[in-house]
Amino acid sequence: MYFYVVGVGEAMESRRGGPADCYREQVTNPPAPQFSVRAEARGDIDAIHALTAAAFGQVDEAELVDALRASGNGLEGLSFVGVLDEEVIAHAMLSRCFVGDVPGVCLAPCSVWPEHQRTGVGTAVIEALLAEAARRGEAFAVVLGHAEYYPRFGFTPASGFGITLHVDVPGDALMAMPLAGEVPAGALAFAPEFGV
Ligand SMILES: CC(C)(COP(=O)(O)OP(=O)(O)OC[C@H]1O[C@@H](n2cnc3c(N)ncnc32)[C@H](O)[C@@H]1OP(=O)(O)O)[C@@H](O)C(=O)NCCC(=O)NCCS
C-alpha cells in the first residue's frame, strides 16, 4: 500500500499505508479549525458555567443557567453548545416562558468565550437551537438582549406583537419571533429564576 505526500505541486510516493486521496487533500488543503454544534451533555455542565461567567464577566448568568437547569424551566434538550477541539466554547439555552397562558421559549443566556467571540459560533449555536425548538413544536421565542444582534435570527420588537412586560426595558431589547406557531399578544412572564 502506498500513499502520497504532496509537496509544492508534485506528488511523492511513500511506502506507508493509508488512504491516498484523503491524505493528499489534507496536505494540500489543511482544514481550518471548525466548531461543531450539539445538545448539551452531562459532562458539559462545568465548562458551560465557566464560559458563561467568562462571557459576562460575572457569575450571575452562570448561576442562572444552573438554576434554570435544576428547576426544569430550562428545557431538557434545548440547551446547545458549540465545540472546538473538544472544548465547549459557546452555549445557548431556552427556558419556558408564557405570553398570557400561551407557552413559548425564552432564549437566554447566550455565551461565547471572549477569545472566540465574533467567529460565528454564537450564531451557529442559536440557529441550531431555535431550529430544534421549532422542530419540537414550540410556537414562539422571545429574547431580551442586544437589539442589533438578535434580528438576524428573525426576532423583531415584541411590542409589534402586542407583548407587554411589567417592567421597563430599554428600546427594542425585548424581541419575539414565531417558530412552529404564532406569536401571541399579552403579558410576558419569564421563568421565575430570571427574577424579572
Ligand atoms: C453576544 C454573543 C453571544 C454573540 O456570539 P458571537 O459568536 O460573538 O457572535 P457571532 O460571531 O455569531 O456573530 C457576530 C456578529 O454579532 C455581532 N455582535 C456580537 N456581539 C454583539 C453585541 N454585544 N451587540 C451587538 N452585536 C454583536 C457582531 O457585530 C457580528 O456582526 P456581523 O455578523 O454583522 O459582523 C457573544 O458575543 C457573547 O457571548 N457576548 C458576551 C455575553 C453576551 O452579551 N451575551 C448575550 C446577552 S443578550
Image: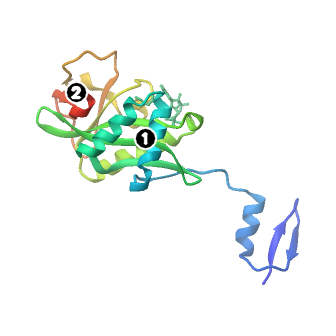
Asked if the residue at tag 1 contacts the one at tag 2, i.e. Cβ–Cβ closer than 8 Å, the answer is: no
Which of the numbered marks, if any, corresponds to residue 146? none
Query: Quadrant where the C terminus lies?
Result: top left
- Which of the 4 image quadrants contains residue 5? bottom right
Give SS at disc 2: helix
In this image, 185 relative to 148: left or right? left
The residue tagged 2 is 161
Query: Marks 2/1: CA distance?
Result: 34 Å
Rate crowding at label 1 as few (under 14), some (14 to 19) or many (20 or more) other CA atoms within 10 Å: some
Report the front residue among 45 and 19: 45
Between residue 130 and residue 195, name the one nearer to us: 195
Image quarter of residue 188 = top left
Percent across and percent down for residue 181 are 22, 43
Tell me, yes or no, if residue 124 can be seen here.
yes
**In this image, 141 relative to 44: left or right?**
left
| SS at circle 1 | helix
Q: Amino acid at mark 1?
A: His
* Tag 2: amino acid: Phe
Q: Is residue 108 visible?
A: no
Q: Quadrant of the N terminus?
A: bottom right
Compared to residue 174, the image places residue 139 above or below, namely: below
Q: Residue at 41%, 31% (x, y): give it.
A: 59
Q: Is residue 25 above or below residue 88?
A: below
Q: Which mark is residue 49?
A: 1
Whole-percent x and y of residue 61?
38, 32
Q: Is residue 113 left or right of residue 174?
A: right
Place of residue 56 in the rendered image (x, y in percent of width and height, measured from the top left): 46, 29
